[in-house]
Image: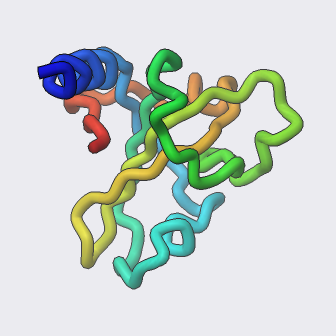
Amino acid sequence: MEEDEDRTVWDLAWSSMPHRRILDVSKFDFVKVSGLDPGEVVTVTIAEAPMEHLQKMYVSTPICPICGKSTEAESDRVAVGFYPRFTRISRLGFAGWAHKKCLDVCPLIDEPTPIPW
């Protein structure tokens, strides 16, 4: 029962986060981070991660998926989930860091925020 309750809290936290689109997907190697042969990048969406669940996430990269620069020495970085769609694989999800200022310029979209497993 506790696992179900934890999952409900997790799902609600993620679904309440604003969902955005990365307009320029050329500054980050989404194929490399996937470790697969997913084809070409079609589109990428992104959402800030709920801070209360950060310790449960495996953050795969310190490179901002929006600008392609490191966030390691930055104080304005935020944890994010980003979701590339490729020509061969419809959707994958990763956790990483992004610059807050980069995230803020990504436009909001009218799609539900993906909920990571």
At a point 58% along the width and 23% down the height, the residue shown is 104
Q: Position of residue 116 (x, y in %)?
A: 31, 41
Q: Residue furthest bottom?
A: 37
Q: Residue furthest right?
A: 73
Q: Position of residue 25 (x, y in %)?
A: 53, 57
Q: How many circles with numbers are drawn on the protein?
A: 0
Q: Is residue 5 above or below residue 25?
A: above
From the image, which quarter does the C terminus lie in?
top left
- Camera-side residue of 110 and 18: 18
Q: Is residue 43 visible?
A: no
Q: Position of residue 34 (x, y in %)?
A: 46, 69
Q: Is residue 87 above or below residue 58?
A: below
At a point 82% along the width and 23% down the height, the residue shown is 75
Q: Is residue 38 above or below residue 70?
A: below
- Camera-side residue of 91 and 25: 91
Q: In the picture provided, is 20 more to the left or to the right than 98?
A: left
The image quarter containing residue 98 is top right
- Camera-side residue of 23 and 3: 3
At a point 65% along the width and 59% down the height, the residue shown is 27
Q: In the picture provided, is 74 more to the left or to the right than 117?
A: right
Q: Is residue 7 visible?
A: yes
At a point 37% along the width and 52% down the height, the residue shown is 93
State how the image is colored. Answer: rainbow
The image quarter containing residue 19 is top left
Q: Position of residue 58 (x, y in %)?
A: 52, 46
Q: In the picture provided, is 75 more to the left or to the right than 16?
A: right
From the image, which quarter does the N terminus lie in?
top left
